[in-house]
Image (spheres, rainbow, N blue to C red):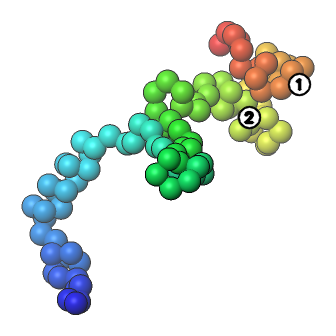
Amino acid sequence: MAKVKRSDIDTNPPQAVKDMLEKKLAKMKPKKQDFIPENFVGKAGKGYILKNWVIHRGYGAPIVNKRFRDAVRLMGSKDQHLLSKKLQLRMKAGGPRYAAMGVAK
């Protein structure tokens, strides 16, 4: 068995290698989805794995609009005055989901 060691290229890479690595990492896209194994059902070869499908970007991703984020983040804090009066009233009347629906700027 061979021992793994850190070399000079790992700890102190030359500028050309740093630039190349930075360019490659900048071009990489984040994962679109993951399949997470949850449970095995059945016996041996006739069984199957139940998986949880998590979507990170695109349709199905858990993303909210900017108004909703601001309403939740600022309401009840010292920066509440940054929200518009209309948004504050709608927040008090029906919560963040109601406040974020169709409010004109």
At horizontal 19% and vertical 48% (from top left) the residue drawn is 23
Closest to the observer: 40 or 64? 40
> Residue 78's spot in the image, x, y percent?
79, 42
15 relative to 103, above or below: below
Name the image quarter holding the C terminus.
top right
At horizontal 16% and vertical 81% (from top left) the residue drawn is 8
Amino acid type shown at disc 1: Lys
Name the image quarter holding the N terminus.
bottom left
> Residue 55's spot in the image, x, y percent?
50, 36
Residue on which the image places disc 1:
92
104 relative to 12, above or below: above
Q: Is 11 situated left or right of 67 in this image? A: left
Q: Is residue 38 visible?
A: no
Q: What's the distance in space between the residues labelled 1 and 2, CA to CA?
A: 12 Å
Element class at badge 1: helix
At horizontal 22% and vertical 86% (from top left) the residue drawn is 5
Q: Is 89 situated left or right of 82 in this image? A: right
Closest to the observer: 87 or 48? 48
Residue on which the image places disc 2:
72
Report the residue that reaches farthest toward the left: 16
Amino acid type shown at disc 2: Val
At horizontal 71% and vertical 20% (from top left) the residue drawn is 100
> Residue 17's spot in the image, x, y percent?
13, 62
> Residue 31's spot in the image, x, y percent?
39, 42
Q: Name which quarter of the figure residue 96 lies in.
A: top right
Report the residue that reaches farthest toward the right: 93
How many residues crowd mark 2 within 10 Å: few (<14), some (14–19), many (20+)? Answer: some
Mark 1 or mark 2, which has the lower sequence index?
Answer: 2
